[in-house]
């Protein structure tokens, strides 16, 4: 049974890599491995939630300001709905799209870029690689991942696979609730522009994510601007990457579908190998 599950798992991951790269599965493979078998494997794995809960106290860029939550009210009377009187209650949420753990689609920076509703759903489940730079932060608290760091990672874990999602672990997420002021420090550990370009152009990743609320600490957000204006998307404010291995996991990310949406809180989780 163990051997069979290993075979199914291997085929599943290979299939997902092909799908994310835009390839079609061989007919024989598609017929042999059913979705029921794939789900059996997935359901047996550990899931790690990579998403922060958010509230009006959640860290946010000072240019946007905090969210407000209020009880939804009858538009004719202004009276909030209650379970006691109406049998239900609901929240009215007022917040910027880039709030909490959220998606940045290309259109966030590019007037001609893809909006949230245009990102292909096949890109919402991808092989996941994690670059852990926490050891480097002991000497340089604001270290930015470099191409040399990526090559050192590849010597240990193998080449970054095309069609994957690349995440940057900094452990900043531990300060999200515990120390919001520290979480919002500037500068902070981030991606270097050269690393972002290398991963997209030389390794063919599909998307990237990080624990901070910006991709980099350059004055003009050079890395973020480049990736969004080149048709790529990212997830900001990721959590609990310390529970995910460097390779072998899958990431699943989803978000609402506002028409021509420029950003929104997202739900991301990892399926461990």
Image: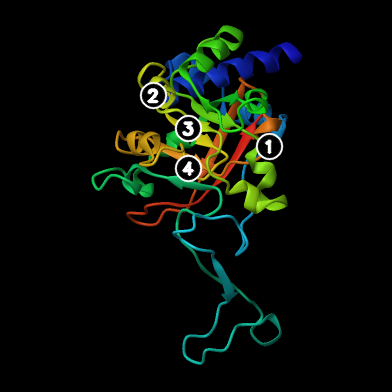
* Label placed on residue 214: 4
Relative to 216, residue 257 above or below:
below
Q: CA distance from mark 1 to mark 2?
A: 25 Å
Q: How many marks?
A: 4
Q: CA distance from mark 3 to mark 1?
A: 17 Å
Residue 156 in the image: x percent, y percent?
A: 61, 9
Element marked by disc 4? loop
Q: Which comes sooner in the sequence, label 2 or label 3? A: 2
Q: Which comes sooner in the sequence, label 3 or label 4? A: 3
Relative to 108, residue 206 above or below:
above
- Of tags 4 and 1, the one toward the viewer is 4
Q: CA distance from mark 2 to mark 4?
A: 18 Å
Residue 22 in the image: x percent, y percent?
A: 37, 24
Element marked by disc 2? helix
Q: CA distance from mark 4 to mark 1?
A: 23 Å
Assess whether mark 1 and mark 3 are in contact (beta carbons under 8 angstroms): no
Residue shown at the point (39%, 24%) measured from the top left = 200
Residue 199 in the image: x percent, y percent?
A: 42, 22
Q: CA distance from mark 3 to mark 4?
A: 12 Å
Q: Which comes sooner in the sequence, label 3 or label 1? A: 1
| Residue 15 in view in this figure | yes
Q: Which comes sooner in the sequence, label 2 or label 4? A: 2
Q: Is 250 situated left or right of 195 in this image?
A: right
- The residue at the far bottom in this view is 77
Assess whether mark 1 and mark 4 are in contact (beta carbons under 8 angstroms): no
- Of tags 1 and 2, the one toward the viewer is 2
Relative to 7, residue 246 above or below:
below
Element marked by disc 1? strand
Residue shown at the point (41%, 17%) measured from the top left = 203
Q: Which residue is mark 1?
A: 48
* Label placed on residue 200: 2
């Amino acid at each position: 049974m163990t051997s069979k599950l290993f075979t199914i798992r291997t085929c599943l991951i290979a299939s997902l890599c092909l799908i994310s790269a835009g390839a079609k599965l061989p007919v024989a493979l598609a017929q042999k491995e059913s979705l029921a078998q794939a789900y059996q494997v997935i359901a047996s794995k550990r899931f790690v939630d990579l998403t922060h809960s958010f509230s009006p106290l959640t860290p946010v860029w000072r240019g946007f300001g905090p969210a407000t939550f209020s009880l939804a009210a009858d538009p004719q009377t202004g009276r909030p709905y209650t379970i006691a009187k109406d049998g239900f209650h609901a929240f009215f949420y007022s917040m910027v799209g880039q709030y909490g753990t959220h998606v940045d689609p290309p259109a966030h920076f590019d007037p001609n870029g893809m909006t949230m509703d245009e990102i292909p759903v096949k890109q919402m489940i991808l092989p996941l690689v994690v670059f852990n730079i926490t050891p480097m932060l002991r000497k340089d608290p604001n270290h930015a991942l470099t191409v040399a760091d990526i090559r050192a990672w590849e010597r240990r874990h193998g080449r970054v696979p095309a069609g994957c999602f690349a995440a940057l672990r900094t452990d900043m997420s531990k300060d999200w609730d515990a120390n919001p002021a520290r979480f919002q420090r500037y500068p902070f550990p981030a991606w270097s522009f050269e690393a972002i370009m290398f991963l997209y152009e030389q390794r063919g990743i599909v998307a990237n994510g990080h624990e901070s609320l910006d991709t980099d600490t350059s004055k003009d957000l050079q890395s973020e601007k480049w990736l969004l204006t080149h048709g790529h998307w990212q997830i900001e404010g990721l959590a609990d990457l310390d529970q995910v291995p460097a390779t072998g996991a899958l990431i699943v990310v989803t978000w609402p579908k506002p028409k021509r949406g420029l950003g929104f809180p997202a739900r991301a989780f990892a399926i461990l190998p």
